[in-house]
Image (tube, rainbow, N blue to C red):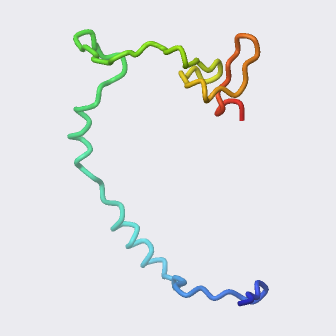
Amino acid sequence: MATDYDAPRSVPDAPEADSLEDLTSRRAEAAIVDDQGEEDADSFELPGADLSGEELTVRVIPKRNDEFTCTSCFLVQHRSQLARQQGHELLCRDCAD
């Protein structure tokens, strides 16, 4: 079916023009403040907080023989992701694009 792109468009659900009083009353109704945010503020850690008593449990896996570290993004990638090698610079496919 051919479409005439020069024909005037009809918008099926066009909003009708509202009066200024209707718009201001809707705006006042929409400006309700959420009081629950104050309770959540206590659970956040502030920058510079003392975390010396915390212990991380992260398992570190050493780089394998079939992996390399990209010199651009510094991510460890599998050799199949190697796009370019110039001297000691190794680039992954994401960084080479």
The structure residue drawn at horizontal position 55% and vertical position 23%, both measured from the top left corner, is 75
Quarter of image, res 94: top right
Whether residue 36 is situated above or below residue 61 in the rendered picture: below
The structure residue drawn at horizontal position 49% and vertical position 82%, both measured from the top left corner, is 18
The structure residue drawn at horizontal position 67% and vertical position 23%, both measured from the top left corner, is 91
Give the camera-side residue of 24 and 83: 83
Give the camera-side residue of 52 and 21: 52
Whether residue 1 is situated above or below residue 58 in the rendered picture: below
Give the camera-side residue of 83 and 97: 83
Task: Count the labels in the image.
Answer: 0
Q: Is residue 60 left or right of residue 19?
A: left
Looking at the picture, how far across and down is residue 84, in whole percent? 73, 24
Q: Is residue 18 left or right of residue 47?
A: right
Q: Quadrant of the N terminus?
A: bottom right
Quarter of image, res 43: top left
Whether residue 44 is situated above or below residue 1 in the rendered picture: above
Looking at the picture, how far across and down is residue 33, in whole percent? 30, 54
Whether residue 90 is situated above or below residue 95 in the rendered picture: above
The structure residue drawn at horizontal position 71% and vertical position 30%, both measured from the top left corner, is 96
- Looking at the image, the residue that sits furthest to the right is 6
Looking at the picture, how far across and down is residue 56, in whole percent? 28, 16
Q: Quadrant of the C terminus?
A: top right
Looking at the picture, how far across and down is residue 60, in whole percent? 38, 15
